[in-house]
Image (cartoon, grey):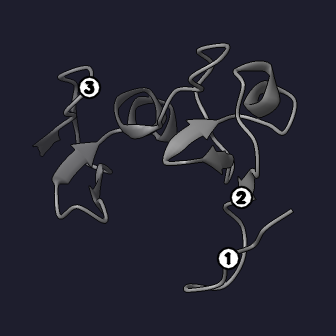
C-alpha cells in the first residue's frame, strides 16, 4: 500500500506522477494530484487543470485572465513540444 502525498490515505490502487522538474509524487486520486501539483491562475487563483495560457512565464487559466492582469502576447500552452502555440 502506498500513501497519498496530499491526503495521507493509504490506498492499494495509488499511482505515481513525475513532474517535468523531476519531482515524484504518489496519489490516491486525480483530485489529490490536481490539488497538489496543478498551477494556480495568477489573476483569479483557480487551479489550471487544462493547458492554460502563459504570458512572460506567468500562467493563467484562460485568455480572459491574462490581459486582465496586464499581460500581452499570450501563449496558448497546447500544441506539440517545441511549438509556440501562439494565439
Res. 64 image quadrant: top right
Q: Give the residue at x 68% y 46%.
A: 52
Q: Secondary structure at mark 2?
A: strand
Horizontal relation, residue 71 to residue 10: left or right: right
State if disc 2 and disc 1 touch (CB < 8 Å): yes
- Judging by the rendered image, the residue that carries numbered circle 2 is 75
Q: Give the residue at x 43% y 26%.
A: 35
Q: Given this view, does label 3 or label 2 mark the residue nearer the observer? A: 2
Q: Give the residue at x 72% y 25%.
A: 70
39 w.r.t. 52: above or below: above
State if disc 3 and disc 1 touch (CB < 8 Å): no
User: Residue 62: percent from the left, percent from the top?
Assistant: 79, 37
User: Residue 31: percent from the left, percent from the top?
Assistant: 50, 31
Horizontal relation, residue 2 to residue 17: left or right: left
Q: Secondary structure at mark 1?
A: loop
Q: Residues within 10 Å of mark 1 (few under 14, many from 20)?
A: few
Q: Which sits in the foreground, 20 or 7?
A: 20
- Judging by the rendered image, the residue that carries numbered circle 1 is 84
Horizontal relation, residue 64 to residue 42: left or right: right
User: Residue 20: percent from the left, percent from the top?
Assistant: 31, 65
Q: Secondary structure at mark 3?
A: loop
Give the Cα distance between marks 1 and 2.
Answer: 7 Å
- Judging by the rendered image, the residue that carries numbered circle 3 is 6
- Name which of mark 1 and mark 3 comes first in the sequence: 3
Q: Name the quarter where the C terminus is drawn.
A: bottom right
43 w.r.t. 75: above or below: above
Q: Which sits in the foreground, 87 or 36?
A: 87
Q: Residue at the far top: name it.
A: 44
Amino acid at each position: 500500500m502506498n500513501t497519498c502525498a496530499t491526503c495521507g490515505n493509504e490506498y492499494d490502487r495509488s499511482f505515481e506522477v513525475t513532474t517535468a522538474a523531476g519531482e515524484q509524487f504518489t496519489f490516491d486520486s486525480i483530485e489529490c494530484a490536481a490539488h497538489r501539483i496543478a498551477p494556480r491562475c495568477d489573476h483569479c487563483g483557480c487551479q489550471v487543470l487544462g493547458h492554460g495560457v502563459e504570458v512572460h512565464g506567468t500562467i493563467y487559466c484562460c485568455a480572459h485572465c491574462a490581459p486582465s492582469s496586464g499581460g500581452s502576447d499570450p501563449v496558448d500552452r497546447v500544441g506539440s513540444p517545441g511549438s509556440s502555440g501562439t494565439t
